[in-house]
Amino acid sequence: MSFQFKQRSVLPGFNLTLGYSVLYLSLIVLLPLATLFTRAASLSWSEFWAVASDSRAVASYKLTLGASLAGALANALFGFIVAWTLVRYSFPGRKLFDAIVDLPFAMPTAVSGIALTAIYSQNGWIGRWLEPLGIKAAFSPLGVTIALTFIGLPFVVRTLQPALQELEIELEDAAASLGANRWQTFRRVIFPALFPALLTGFALAFARALGEYGSVIFIAGNMPMKTEITSLLIIVKLEQYDYAGAAAIAVVMLVASFVILLGVNLLQWWFARRHNGRG
Amino acid sequence: MLGAPSTHDSGAPATGSRDPAAVKWGLIAATVLFLLLFLALPLAAIFTEALRKGFGAYLASFHDPAALDAIKLTLLVSAIAVPLNVVFGLAAAWAIAKFEFVGKSLLTTLIDLPFAVSPVISGLIYVLLFGLHGWFGSWLSEHNFKIIFAVPGIVLATMFVTFPFVARELIPLMQEQGSDEEQAALVLGANGWQTFRRVTLPNVKWGLLYGVILCNARAMGEFGAVSVVSGHIRGLTDTVPLHVEILYNEYNFVAAFAVASLLALLALVTLGAKTLVEMKVRRELAEAAALASPRHNNEGQS
Amino acid sequence: MSIELRNISKSFGQFQALRGVNLTVPDGQLVALLGPSGSGKTTLLRVIAGLESADGADKPEILFHRQDVAGADVRSRGVGFVFQHYALFRHMNVFENIAFGLRVRPRAARPAEAQIRERVRELLRLVQLEGLEGRFPSQLSGGQRQRVALARALAVEPKILLLDEPFGALDARVRQDLRRWLRRLHDEIHVTSVFVTHDQEEALEVADRVVVMNKGRIEQEGTPDDVFHNPASEFVMNFLGNVNLFHGRVEEGKAVLGSLVVDSPDGKKAPGANAKLFVRPYDLDIRLEDTGGLLGARIVRIQSAGSVVKLELLADGEKPLHVELTHTRFRELKIAPGRRIFVVPRDARVFVEDYTI
């Protein structure tokens, strides 16, 4: 059997469309991305390490990672409730609430950023109620977390909804007929079935939060070492014409989000294998 | 991968609930309250802040020539980026959905790559390529080309962040539809272009529109990537989202929120259009299934 | 227009779909390609159309009216093809579906709009779908879609009509009607036609000639009578209807199967070989007394609702047998389940096992 790049087909246009796609992909995406790595590689290992592990950079990693994780966890909880309610119950305005879930996705991030800042600053609609409780929402790590929760919500809800819809009602009826109460059914039948989707949604929200910029910088306050996210630090380096430094930190960030996405794909593969009986 | 949450079926709930009424209404209340406080409130805040000093002040914000320039630039940028990504999306979907070739899944994964890249990095890579100290920097400045801190850079960064939208809508749709109808058209004597234009394109028109809507919304609203390459030159390299930031940082809140309200309206229109088109896309898929055109899988077909 | 195929082989990866097929389809005939799934019949049809290209070591030849078209692409072969699932253009109504082939012709060859309308009306009349031209495929029944697909294929006046499982996706009742209709239509338009089916009844009822395929090869080719009454191989015998199988040996030019002895012309060539005896259920008769050379059996079940009476028997040695009797014969015999009877073949096919394999 000789090696065949492409199966024969009567449809025309393969060379043209594939050639164009690969060329365009290379020019717009692959080549520019490759520059990032070559530029970072222009630093020696110790220089790279010095930039990447600089205390200001480390503080920004901690904030970005911590707030992204907290936001993604909050989304896993609230997103689950929202998805469950939207799929399982009918109530007035359900379709409208379903549509509004995409708002953080459709809204330009800068607009979300200033809107959230307006609400959570100390005389804002919500901020003024938090202030007497001693909670400072805007211009604090909490503000960063709020913004990252905001932009991540659609990812969890939209990943869970199809999974919830596909969940067979018979499964729950079967559990009930075997004597399980509603909570046992949820914990032992429903939740395990939805867990892979929940995990995917969580990871997507997490990865998106790691790189988020627009919605965060207004509410963060951007104080170095305290409320400065990694994305912003890259811009700061760029403004000082420290291209190599910017590239080094960008590589750290990019690798972190790839590792997360890869991890999720592996977990999903593992779940799929377990459920399809190792095939 | 990161990006547009996928099309889902938001039809009516499949069955009556098996949950106790208290649980059901408790969860509904929690959901409604959460969505109102967390999502609807920021939307309301934009319009409230924009109209804080009355409707006159709101309208006056748009008399600023810089605001008008920003709107023009944003329209220009998406008028270039969106059609280019549409052409790419159609080409990539045709190659991936209608043919079997080595490396197909790698290509599909690479197309999604920009969704996994932070906006700031999406801008940064073009600075590294074309900036003053970038790869082509000195060559560009010798020949008096300006990409970074100029419109071409903004277009490139926008193309990058909106790159996957059209392709990722079309690929699954065209895969689902198979190629039976195209084969039928060829047997009837149609050439490749006629087949594409008369058979394939009409079959995916709603999916294509859906991709265009998402692509356009992102193109007009992109902030991080554009912010890195723009240089914020008022009247020249200032897009609408960047203009919002400038006004905001100048403590000109009414004007900032007024301009932001334009983008918020765009987002609402996008959501509305998306909801409508989503139903059409689902119908396109359902019809493909109902007319039962399973792909010729070439394995022992007989 | 006649079709001649020589050395047609085709493989998909490791799977060999066709192994050196040679076939001639005479002008104006309606030919069935019959076989189980995986036998290569659809692949052969698609090779004729130009939707697949033949491969293999020997140079494949495809001749339409003695012209080699093997190198011609699907557009220029001028065949009509009806797809298994019809592949109707779902965004076009019935009229536009049928008119498509005329509309995509190069400007010089394209008929005027009025001519296109006239041609489509004519075809709608032919396939009895007048009045439905405004409907979309999703608004049609399976049988109607089938006829639209046929009209669409006929619109371009093909010299050859190819149909892939034309009745496969329809329910039993509609199938019956449509296949008679297709036969009448063919008698009317007389275009050389090849259709693929896995249903032997369909092939025998509709076709002028039947080509039985198995594992990428042609097992037998002939008129329906021919293949049914003179099956060339075990496979054909088995595939064309229910059959009872007996194992035995060849002795003195006869096949000996337990107490049964049957003439076997092939037997002289291979004395001592294993023999297989195939008997159709309606070729087994029943006797109430053993008159020698008969096979004893017990009646397990009788099903007499239907055009024939079907008996399930258990022959000596616990071998299940199927017998079909006319109602007249059944009434003569006056038999009931549990009764011991004797079986005799009226007609049988003996296949001597081939040692060359």
Image (cartoon, coloured by chain):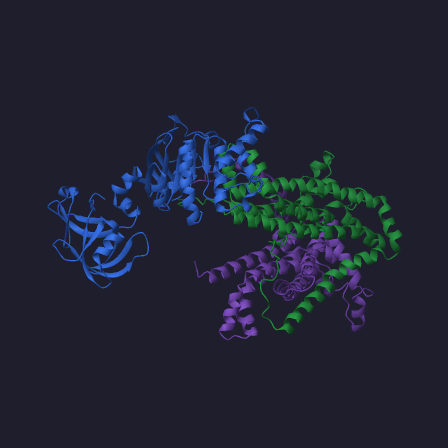
Chain colours: A purple, B green, C blue
Of all residues, the one furthest to the left in this rendering is C252
**Residue A279, position as x, y percentages in the image:** 43, 58
Give the answer, above or below, for where B141 lies relative to A192. above
Give the answer, above or below, for where A177 lies relative to A154. below
> Which of the pair A168/C309 is nearer the observer?
C309
Q: How many marks?
A: 0
**Residue C295, position as x, y percentages in the image:** 17, 56
**Residue B299, position as x, y percentages in the image:** 41, 45
The picture quadrant where one finds residue A253 is bottom right
> On the rendered structure, is C189 left or right of C213?
right
Residue at (27, 46) in percent of width and height: C237
**Residue B225, position as x, y percentages in the image:** 70, 49
Of all residues, the one furthest to the top in this rendering is C108
> Which of the pair A207/A200 is nearer the observer?
A200
> On the rendered structure, is C262 left or right of C193?
left
> Which of the pair B121/C15 is nearer the observer?
C15
Residue at (53, 71) in percent of width and height: A188
> Which of the pair B32/B221 is nearer the observer?
B32
